[in-house]
Amino acid sequence: MKVIDLTHVIAEVMPVYPGTEPPKLAQANTYEVDGFKETLMTMFSHTGTHMDPPAHLFGHRTTLDKMDITQFVGKALVIDCRDLKNGEQVSIDRIKKYGAKADEAEFILFNYGWDKKWGTDDYFGDYPYVSDEVVDFLIAGNKKGVGMDVIGIDPIPDENLTIHKKLFTNNEIVVIENLMNLDQCGDDLFWFFALPLKWDNADGSPIRALAFWED
């Protein structure tokens, strides 16, 4: 069995979406006083490596707690996009190079190499993003999810969240942002687990994302 962690650590000093407050990890109980340690965690639901459901943008759409657990597990494929320049789009031709594997995958994950910028100002830079044709492919293929190693599927200047809206309007799909270690996943299919916290009316959640290969 081989397992790779695709999840960034949540810490008080970490990249967060512009305008969002960073998490707070306050010591609530101590070994010395209480005989045990407990931490009060205060954070936004879209902190760190996290997942967006359709309800993130549309009040009448599905929240994470209402999705079947099978939505968060499936076969994944990493699309290597590390050669793209800043702000360049992922074309559908790049996905077609993977042939039947791209069709079979339930999750498509885009490796921009951006996790190497985590913790620096460059992480908020002009990262690549998917084209309309790629979004159409995800929808037509009824994919369970799409993920990437940047802070958003939409470019930061796009306050309309155009790609989010196109994906979420009529489709049961999740968007996974701030992944890491995608360069360790190869170019074949693997098992992918992206498990959100199960909280009521969840518009999003930090997740523990894993890549898994059986012996």
Image (cartoon, rainbow, N blue to C red):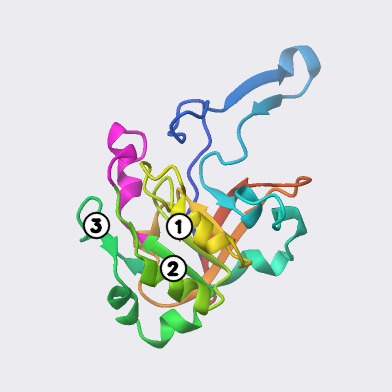
Mark 1 / mark 2, whichever is N-terminal: 2
* 158, 151: nearer the viewer: 158
Does 140 lie within the magenta span?
no
Mark 1 / mark 3, whichever is N-terminal: 3
- Residue 104 vertical position relative to residue 145 in the rendered view, above or below: below
Q: Amino acid at mark 1?
A: Ile
Please give left or right for residue 69 compared with residue 156 in the image.
Answer: right
The residue indicated by pointer 1 is 163
Please give left or right for residue 73 compared with residue 66 in the image.
Answer: left
Mark 2 / mark 3, whichever is N-terminal: 3
- Residue 92 appears in the rendering: yes
Residue in the picture at 53% in, 63% down: 167
SS of the residue under disc 1: helix
Q: Amino acid at mark 3?
A: Glu
The residue indicated by pointer 3 is 88
Measure the alpha-carbon separation of dots 1 and 3: 15 Å
Question: Is disc 1 surrounded by few (<14), some (14 to 19) or many (20+) residues within 10 Å?
Answer: some
Numbered badge on residue 112 = none
Please give left or right for residue 207 compared with residue 162 in the image.
Answer: right
* 25, 133: nearer the viewer: 133
- Residue 145 vertical position relative to residue 122 in the rendered view, above or below: below
Residue in the picture at 47% in, 54% down: 6
Question: Is disc 3 surrounded by few (<14), some (14 to 19) or many (20+) residues within 10 Å?
Answer: some
Does 113 lie within the magenta span?
yes
Residue at the outermost bottom position: 100
The boundaries of the magenta stretch are 111-126
The residue indicated by pointer 2 is 135
Foreground mark, 1 or 3? 1
Please give left or right for residue 200 compared with residue 104 in the image.
Answer: right
